[in-house]
Image (spheres, coloured by chain):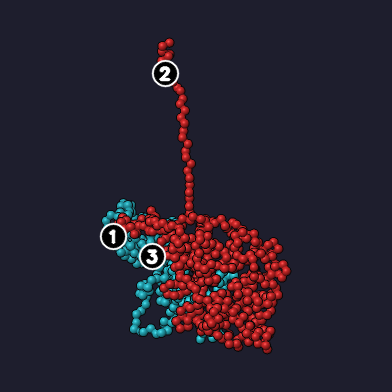
Chain colours: A cyan, B red
Amino acid sequence: MGNNQPGGMYKRDRPYDSEKSGSHSRSRGGIPSSSPSNEDECPVQMKIAKGDDKSKFPVVFKWNINNATPRQVYICGSWDGWNTKIPLVKSTSDFSTIVDLEPGKHEYKFMVDSKWVVDDNQQKTGNNLGGENNVVMIDEADFEVFDALDKDLASSNAGEALRNSHPTKESHDTPNDRELEKLHQFGQETPTRVDFNKAAAPPVLPPHLLQVILNKDTPVQCDPNVLPEPDHVMLNHLYALSIKDGVMVLSATHRYRKKFVTTLLYKPI
Amino acid sequence: MNNTTGRLRRNKATTFESPSIPKAFFDLQHHFIFSKRKAPVDGIEAIQRDGASISEHAVVKYANDERPDEKEKQDLENMFKTVLRIGVQNSDIVYTHLLQLSQCYEAMARNNKLIVFTNDISVRKAFNGLIYNCMRTGLVADSQTLEITGVLSVTDFIMVLMMLWKYRENLDELKGTPLSHEDFRQMDIAYMPISRWKGCLETKGQLKPFINIGLKESIFRAVELLTKYRIHRLPVMDEKTGDCAYILTHRRILHYIWKHCALLPKPECLSQRVVDLEIGSWKNLIFANEQTPLIECLDMLIDNNISGIPIVQKNTLKVLEVYTRFDAASAAFSDHIDLSVSVTRAIQERDYQNGIRRDGVVTANYTTTLWSLIEIFIDKNVHRIFMVDDRTILKGIISLSDVIEFLVLRPTKKNGVTTGEPMEK
């Protein structure tokens, strides 16, 4: 009631209500108005993720409560020829609903406590009966953001984990084990040995051990009694030369205080 | 008029005579300050035996920043440590004191290489091991207990070769024929174990005792042993376990002195000429000419207990080559062992051996200073330098042991203290 001017609007709406009872007035009200509308301003206040039907887009309609709280609020529009009155759900400060609409221009009107009113905050246009209707423009471009989200989900590993349930490699956006656990189904089957073939090999030996200190060529300037300083993984290891001429050659490096001694033992077999 | 006569004279300057400031006398002396715990005991005893005084001091153990908490202040042992101090009366004795205060452990390299043969291995195979590793000395261990009982060096191999050759020379049918490698393999002496070879030497009276030194003894003591027994390599053993840590040579001692000489006062003798200091041999030189048979060169090496001889021209004494014991040892790899060939031909054949290093000829002018000579020893890593004149004519021979003995042992002999037997040259 507060949305309208009490005198003028009330008079215009009253003849429309009396005409509505007849079938003729109903069909006349469904004709789209030819008056121009402001297309720059988008009347839709909120858009939610679209449904499965890609030809229609969800649109939110709200009726804000100003002074007195109405008992019932309905919406009727040109998308179905003004046939169905859709009830709006009451919330704390408004009435709202979601209607799937096709792209294009649609006119609609609210029935608040059995009285036809328009929302002065939204775009309006004149109708054939001398009154006014609200207008909404639905454009497909407004919903392009949902396509991007779908593509991102498909390419990410989280999406792949949701589909395959078996992530092959680690990445920065892999969901943690708890999240993956929810996707798996627990069963009674015992895993076979084949499932454990993917296990990694044990850690390799330190690469320092591959550098045998006695195999290094010492420079000519060096004393033949002096060897390079060993790595600590070399200490207390036994090295053996292949047996030649019936003689076995063994060597080991030990630490004595801060220095090292490499001993070669020649022993006949 | 009466007032003027009684007036006191004013503004008269008074001159004071200032006394002269006496001249100050500075008497600075170098000192060795060392830890009492780490210094070798025999080195300290040697210093006290020479008459020098060693004073003991207590110094604060921690720097100012590292002082511990208040509670520990009362514990004197944690606050102070004992150091010893000895003055250097003469700069000539500075290297002697350095070695007397250094353990043999400190001359050890970072990683030392040792070869140990059990005494049941054959002599020929042991020498092959020495040649393969480019080593001059190996240790001999008992085959049962693996306890080190002696050393085996290149000198033993030369003696084996000479013994073989002279044995064949006594046979009329084999006289003059070269000893082939196969002949050497088949002879009994090639399969002689080391223990039997040591027995033969003992029978002839040529076996040298096993001389070794402990790791905690002073390097000065090592120099005394090296000089007394005329050896070049001294095994350094761990006193507790009986294991050998490394083999101390004159070269390592010279490198140790070289490493520390920048921190020490320099003796005056370093800037004098070696010919004036009478280091080494300048008379009755032992040399060979190009046509000398190899067997005679080996005789010179063994009989005179030297490690290398110069090869000179016959008439002019011009130095051409050097023949060392290690060169003789490599003859084992020749197809034919012929000790009757000339030494020049032996050197040429020796050059064809691959993978074996060889000391070249190192000469210096006989007017060189001792400091320059030490630099040549450090740089070339040889054991002897031939002193020549401008035309490369041999004037003298100075070996590494001569330099070590001059730097370390001569200052103590100057004080009238004799260490061991007198040296005869």
Q: Is residue B100 above or below residue B168?
A: above
Residue B420: give x, y in percent of width and height.
50, 68
**Chain letter behind tag 1:** A
Q: Helix, strand or loop at disc 3?
A: loop
Q: Helix, strand or loop at disc 1?
A: loop
Same chain for the residues under marks 1 and 2 in the image? no
Same chain for the residues under marks 3 and 2 in the image? no
Mark 3, Cα crowd under 10 Å, few <14 / some 14-19 / many 20+, is: few
**Residue underneath mark 1:** A92
Q: Which of pointers 1 and 2 indicates the residue nearer the eye?
A: 2
Q: Is residue B182 above or below residue B207?
A: below
Q: Nearer the viewer, residue B298 or B372?
A: B298
The three-letter code of the residue at mark 2 reads Leu
Q: Quadrant of residue B191?
A: bottom right
Q: Which of pointers 3 and 2 indicates the residue nearer the eye?
A: 2
Sequence-wise, which precedes: disc 1 or disc 3? 3
**Residue underneath mark 2:** B8
